[in-house]
Amino acid sequence: MTPAAPTATWRRVCEEYFSRLIEDLEQQVESEVESRVTAAIDAAVRGAVADAASESRRALAEELNQAVRRLRQAANVDDLYAVLLDVTVPFCEQAAVFSIHDKIAHAERMRRPAEVHSGENGAAPSLPALEFPVSEAAAFSTAIDTRDPVIAMSTPAEVSGPLVGLFGHKPDERVYLFPLRGGSEVTALFYAAGHLQPPPLELLAEVAGLQLQIWKAEAAATAIIPQPEPKIADALVNISGAAAKSAEPGKAATAVAAGGNAPRQHTEWWNLSREEQQKHLAAQRFARVQVAEMRLGKPDALRSGRETGNIYAPLHAQIDAAREKFRELHMTAPTMVDYLHLEMIRSLADDDAILLGPSYPGPLV
């Protein structure tokens, strides 16, 4: 063997060794780069998803805020129905608003797919005549009797034959009915169908119902329309003259000494100053909003409380917080009425104060 042979062999061995090292290094580099790129992409995707979700929540909140603002600014009942139909466009394809009079449902406003594309939004000139007894539509009767939202199948027995034909419902299609209460009774129903989102619709229907109640309260308080003999539910807008006659100064002084804000002075609504009337109306609105939040935020707890006859037990935290806020914000006026207590009886306990439960603290005054 020549002297050059060992050198050539050694060189070949070294080259093979370095070649394997380079291959291993390239694989490690490629794996590391892939891992880092994947991690960067995952982080970017997670960030984008989080940003998109946050933006979506912000957009939805803003959209609902604007919708509520528009409902509160409605000029009259007809305008309120039109606004309700308009602001619910993003949350359901088809909708209608029915007024309820003497157990007859009458279509006031309506939105069908063809009208959405044409931009008519159920305007009165294009509204088909639709009226039927609620006894012919089981879902309507249930929503009116229970005063709670109802989910039903779109069959003639549930929502009436004329309505099924007008909307072109399929037998297996689900529809929602949301009651609008103008006081203790349901005076209108919001009907929704087609790829709908129930929570926003329930919220907006609740706001529309509250607006109807406010108008009824203001009308009754200023004697614009004659009112029947007041019940507990209607006491939201009446300061009882009978209570004024039976009030004893000694009891009022005792209440102040016990820690009350001021002696309660009962008088007729028309004897209050404009400023005092505004304070009462603000207190009524506050009470309705607080109780509506309880109904929307804790429906299962409310249902359980009604069934057991002790609504206060599962809702005590919300009720106590609302009572404290009402005391701080509104109980400073000498003539103030505990509208929060009355609204809880009307809206939570269905006009049966006993359902609030034995541990309920009672009215603030």
Image (cartoon, helix red, strand yellow):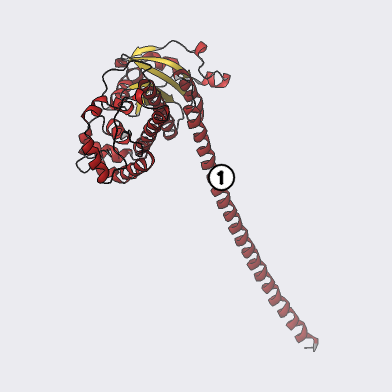
Q: Is residue 227 left or right of residue 25?
A: left
User: x and y percent of residue 230 in the render?
Assistant: 27, 22
**Residue 237 seen by the camera:** yes
Residue occupying the point 28% across, 24% down: 145
Q: Position of residue 313 (x, y in %)?
A: 25, 44
Question: Image quadrant of residue 345?
Answer: top left
The kind of residue tagged 1 is Ala
Residue in the foreground of this view, choosing between 307 and 186: 186
Q: Quadrant of the N terminus?
A: bottom right
**Toward the viewer: 98 or 117?**
98
Q: Nearer the viewer, residue 249 or 25?
A: 249
Q: Residue at x 55, y 48 (%)?
A: 49
In this view, the residue in front, 185 or 219, is: 219
When the figure is inspected, residue 157 is found, relative to residue 290, above or below; the finding is above
Which image quarter is the C terminus in?
A: top left
Kindly identify which residue carries mark 1: 52
Q: Secondary structure at mark 1?
A: helix
Q: Residue at x 57, y 21 (%)?
A: 117
